């Protein structure tokens, strides 16, 4: 499924790749270990920049629900969407076991933006933009989902030699931290590109932080170096 098929900005190959691993999503030592390591830092970045308690939050491309559960525990009222059915099922089951009330839906950002525009105080989209055919269009949908003055958070991968070596050569082929083929270098996104797409969508860039992970110790932290993984905070302006 491409951006042009049915108006859904998604790649069927990418969806199938992640759906096939959904049953392993909550194994902290499995294929999704890097996300488990990143999640506490991503969560902290969000709640430091936007009040989560009582906020209506949307997590786009939620996968098995790591960030959605963390934000729910922080007091947010969370809706979480993904187009991979097995991932949503895994997320629902884990939330049930954890006694968390999260509204999980098989839905696209574009579809929800048409149905519920300007509805969310906080919109998050982590490690997804580099997997869709038209990331600028996805960022536009995130902007339409946020209320004026709301917050949009995006994490992704920088496109440069260092990120290629770290995220693909090392993570996928040398250290086997991720399944081979998880990432395509051409889909990585420079912060300048992300900022430009944000401006076009009516978002103001507030802050960018690097996300550094030591795969051996499991230590992860936010930093001033966005040269590999990074997270960006945008504030939504009034609708144009």
Image (cartoon, rainbow, N blue to C red):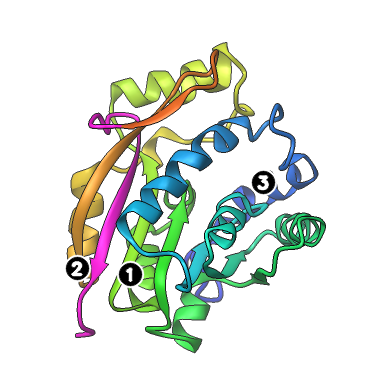
Farthest bottom residue in view:
115
Which residue corresponds to the image point at 39% horizontal and 55% vertical from the top-left? Answer: 47
Left of 52 or right of it: where is 6? Answer: right
Residue at image x 33%, y 69%?
140
Which mark, by number, is residue 140?
1
Q: Nearer the viewer, residue 95 or 175?
A: 95
Identify the residue at image location x=67%, y=31%. 31
Tell me if label 1 and label 2 are in contact, CB under 8 Å.
yes
Gap between marks 2 and 3 measured at Cα? 30 Å
Residue 130 visible to an observer of this rendering = no
Could you say where residue 227 lies in the image, as x and y percent from the top left? Answer: 27, 29
| Residue corresponding to mark 3 | 18
Residue 173 appearing in the image = yes
| 222 or 158, nearer to the observer | 222
| Residue 172 position by quadrant | top right
Q: Is residue 235 magenta?
A: yes
């Amino acid at each position: 499924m491409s951006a042009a098929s049915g108006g859904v900005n998604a790649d069927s190959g990418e969806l199938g790749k992640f759906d096939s691993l959904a049953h392993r999503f909550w194994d902290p030592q499995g294929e999704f270990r890097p996300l488990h390591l990143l999640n506490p830092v991503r969560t902290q970045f969000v709640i430091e920049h936007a009040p989560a308690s009582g906020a209506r939050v949307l997590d786009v491309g939620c996968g098995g629900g790591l960030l959605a559960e963390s934000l729910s525990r922080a007091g947010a009222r969370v809706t979480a969407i993904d187009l991979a059915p097995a991932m949503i099922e895994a997320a629902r089951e884990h939330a049930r076991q954890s006694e968390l009330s999260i509204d999980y839906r098989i839905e696209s950002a574009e579809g929800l933006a048409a149905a519920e525009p300007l509805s969310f105080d906080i919109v998050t989209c982590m490690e997804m933009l580099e997997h869709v055919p038209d990331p600028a269009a996805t960022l536009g949908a995130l902007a339409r989902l946020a209320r004026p003055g709301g917050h949009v958070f995006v994490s992704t991968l920088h496109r440069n030699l260092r990120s290629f070596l770290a995220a693909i050569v090392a993570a996928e082929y040398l250290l086997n931290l991720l399944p081979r083929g998880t990432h395509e270098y051409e889909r990585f996104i420079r912060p300048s590109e992300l900022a430009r797409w944000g401006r076009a969508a009516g978002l103001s860039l507030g802050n960018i932080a690097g996300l550094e992970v030591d795969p051996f110790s499991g230590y992860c932290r936010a930093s001033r170096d966005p040269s590999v993984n990074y997270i960006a905070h945008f504030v939504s302006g009034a609708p144009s």
